[in-house]
């Protein structure tokens, strides 16, 4: 028992143990920052929408209009170079676009090559697969 009393005397004298705890309760506002899950989800939604907008702004959609009947043909995606465009054919079965390969065997090419390929597929134009260079 004597050891415990000496420990408390030493702690009071040197560590101020008597000032660490009292019976008065002081309630202070909690200033910790907590992540708001709704804001996190909203920011994620905005980020996805911005990414979709950027993608949509970099793409051009080509349709064919035959006597008021509109057919979706393809999508061209700008790659940053004037002579190089990504090509995606419209799939009527899925009502969407799928990245495709041009008749040259490349996934990118000039817009005329993509238009020839799409017209050859959807409008029955067999000249789309001629390997002759385009004439100006």
Image: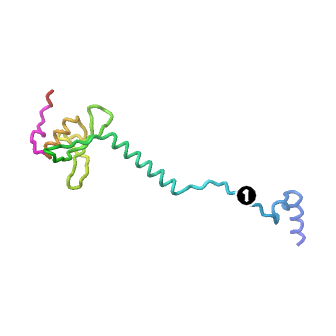
Q: In this view, does 64 lie above or below 35?
A: above
* Residue 79 x/y as whole percent: 31, 37
Split into 4 quadrants, where in the image is the C terminus? top left
Quadrant in which the N terminus appears: bottom right
Compared to 19, does 48 lie above or below? above
Q: Which residue is drawn at 23% across and 36% down?
A: 109
Q: In which quarter of the image is residue 130?
A: top left
> In the image, is residue 79 above or below residue 5?
above
Residue 107: x and y in percent read 24, 41
Query: Which residues lie in the magenta part?
Result: 123-133
Query: Per the image, is 107 magenta?
Result: no
> Residue at point 26% right, 32% down?
83
Residue 96's place in the image compared with 27, above or below, is above
103 or 73: nearer the viewer: 73
Magenta portion: prevailing SS class: loop
In this view, the residue farthest toward the bottom is: 1
| Helix, strand or loop under label 1 | loop
Q: Quadrant of residue 8?
A: bottom right
Q: Which residue is drawn at 10% across and 45% down?
A: 124
In this rendering, the count of numbered labels is: 1
Determine which residue is flagged by label 1: 28
Q: Residue at x 33, y 39 (%)?
A: 58
Direction from residue 28 to residue 55 in the image, left or right = left
Left or right: 11, with 133 as reference point: right
**x and y percentages locating residue 119 in the rendered image:** 15, 42
Residue that protrudes farthest toward the top in the picture? 136
Q: Which residue lies furthest to the front in this view?
A: 68
């Amino acid at each position: 028992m004597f050891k415990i009393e000496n420990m408390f005397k030493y702690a009071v004298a040197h560590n101020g143990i008597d000032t660490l705890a009292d019976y008065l309760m002081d309630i202070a506002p909690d200033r910790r920052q907590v992540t708001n899950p709704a804001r996190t989800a909203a920011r994620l939604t905005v980020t996805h929408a911005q990414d979709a907008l950027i993608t949509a702004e970099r793409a051009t959609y080509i349709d064919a209009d035959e006597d008021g009947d509109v057919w979706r043909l393809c999508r061209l995606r700008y790659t940053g170079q004037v002579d190089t465009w990504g090509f995606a054919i419209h799939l009527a079965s899925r009502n969407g676009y799928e990245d495709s390969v041009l008749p040259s065997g490349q996934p990118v090419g000039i817009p005329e090559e993509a238009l020839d390929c799409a017209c050859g597929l959807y409008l029955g134009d067999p000249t789309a697969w001629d390997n002759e260079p385009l004439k100006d």
